[in-house]
Amino acid sequence: MTHSIAQAAERSGLSIDTLRYYERIGLVDPPARDSGGRRTYSDEDLARLGFLTKLRTTGMPIRMMRQYARARRSGVAGPALCKQILVEHRASVRARIAELRSSLDVLDHKIDNYSQIERDASAAEGRTA
């Protein structure tokens, strides 16, 4: 099945400008064109866009995404380099998750502390009323 650029944008959650930008900088291969010269995206193209979106969501810089895209196209040596890039990025994501969990623990502690202060204040009001 093929999709217009507008449909690809809608399904991927990316803007039309972002799709064109990703093509221009080499993150995605240029999509096929219909008889009118308009871009047509395959389901495989949409899957790649979905993966790129996940990489961005995890904080992968465009520079590293471009390196990954080049490696994916590079033939025999590509899979090993792709794997290396993803393994390194996964370590970075795991470190960020650990940092966020630690920060969440601090927030939970502070919220619990304020909840206790509210309960204590409410109990004190009940005794004076």
Image: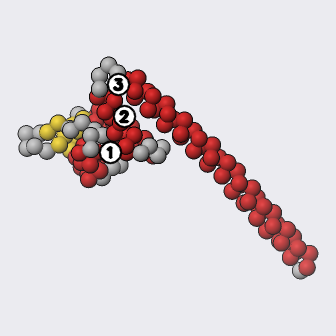
Residue indicated by mark 1? 11
Residue indicated by mark 3? 78
Left or right of 1? Residue 60 is: right
Outermost bottom residue: 129
Q: Position of residue 117 (x, y in %)?
A: 81, 67
Nearer the observer, 122 or 105? 105
Image quarter in which the C terminus is found: bottom right
Give the residue type that dot 3 points to.
Gly
Whether tag 1 and tag 2 are in contact, CB under 8 A, the answer is: no
Q: Secondary structure at mark 1?
A: helix
State the separation of the CA atoms marked 1 and 3.
Answer: 28 Å
State the separation of the CA atoms marked 1 and 2.
Answer: 23 Å
Q: Position of residue 16 (x, y in %)?
A: 26, 51
Q: Residue at x 24, y 48 (%)?
A: 20
Task: Locate residue 73: give its quadrant.
Answer: top left
Give the residue type that dot 1 points to.
Arg
Residue indicated by mark 2? 68
